[in-house]
Image (spheres, rainbow, N blue to C red):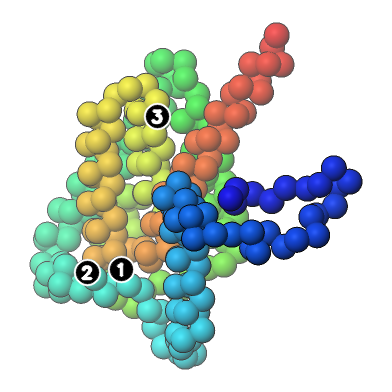
Amino acid sequence: MDITATKTDEGRWGNKPSFMTWTAYDVVYVARHHWIPCLFAAGFLAAMWVESTNKMIPAGSPPYDIGFVATRSLYRVLASSPNLNTALAALNSVLGVMQMTYIIGAWLMEGRPRATITVLFLFTCRAVLGYSTQLPLSQEYLGSATDFPLGNATFFFFFSGHVGGTTIASLDMRRMQRFRLAMVFDILNVLQMIRLLGTRGHYTIDLAVGLVAAIFFYSLAGKYEVMMRKRQF
């Protein structure tokens, strides 16, 4: 059994429904050789169950964020240790400078603009989405004067530019086969995510979308480069 539908020579679907031709062997075959769609099918059923049974957060209540729940202990430590919070914010700012230095350096020093183009795509999209739907600042937010951008400057919450920028740098490093350096950035990115959740500087969805957006726009920037090269010849 093929999981993709086919048409008859006349261009119409066959008279016999596809599922009536399935056998137990077909089901096992699909489960073994098409396990990714099966996994997503299970996820779809789980999502339907959660969506139909989950109660919405009432008006006036703080947002529910699973990342905030998972980092409660870290939040209590940072709330009771302002100096530690400041030090971690400063280290996180160093990572922000590192990612931008690499991205801009790849363009200016190596003549590879793909990562820079990705940043332009990503942050333009972030500005539009961040302004279109402005999520409320968490009342538990632990700010720091050493955070990036420095001085607690106003920044859009949706989605995370911190995570997006670091992911772009990591993707570009992997493209250039700088795998060890990319792994270092990946580890620092995970630690950055934990800290952002622990300080209530971002919601979990901000981090997830920042990661996915970086991957998407890096691919889009690659297609843009290919298109521009074709125009030159």
| Lateral position of residue 56 relative to residue 184, left or right | right
- C-alpha span from label 1 to label 3: 28 Å
- Residue density around tag 1, few if under 14, some if 14–19, many if 20 or more, within 10 Å: some
Q: Say which amino acid is labelled 1.
A: Gly
Q: Which residue is drawn at 45% across and 46% down?
A: 33
Q: Say which amino acid is labelled 3.
A: Asp
Residue placed under numbered mark 3 in the picture: 172
Whole-percent x, y for residue 125 in the image: 57, 49
Residue 21 visible in the displayed image? yes
Q: Is mark 3 on a helix, strand or loop?
A: helix
Residue placed under numbered mark 2 in the picture: 71
Q: Which residue is drawn at 68% across and 59% down?
A: 18
Q: What element carries label 1?
A: helix
| Lateral position of residue 114 relative to residue 139, left or right | right
Q: Which of marks 2 and 3 is nearer the N terminus?
A: 2
Whole-percent x, y for residue 8 in the image: 81, 47
Q: Is mark 2 on a helix, strand or loop?
A: loop
Q: Are marks 2 and 3 in contact (CB under 8 Å)?
A: no
In the current view of this chain or complex, which residue is farthest to the right? 10
Residue placed under numbered mark 1 in the picture: 67
Q: Are marks 2 and 1 in contact (CB under 8 Å)?
A: yes
Q: In which quarter of the image is the C terminus?
A: top right
Q: Do the residues labelled 1 and 3 touch (CB within 8 Å)?
A: no
Whole-percent x, y for residue 110 in the image: 41, 15
- Residue density around tag 3, few if under 14, some if 14–19, many if 20 or more, within 10 Å: many
- C-alpha span from label 2 to label 1: 6 Å
Total label count? 3
Q: Say which amino acid is labelled 2.
A: Thr
Q: Which of 60 and 177 is in front in this view?
A: 177
- C-alpha span from label 2 to label 3: 30 Å
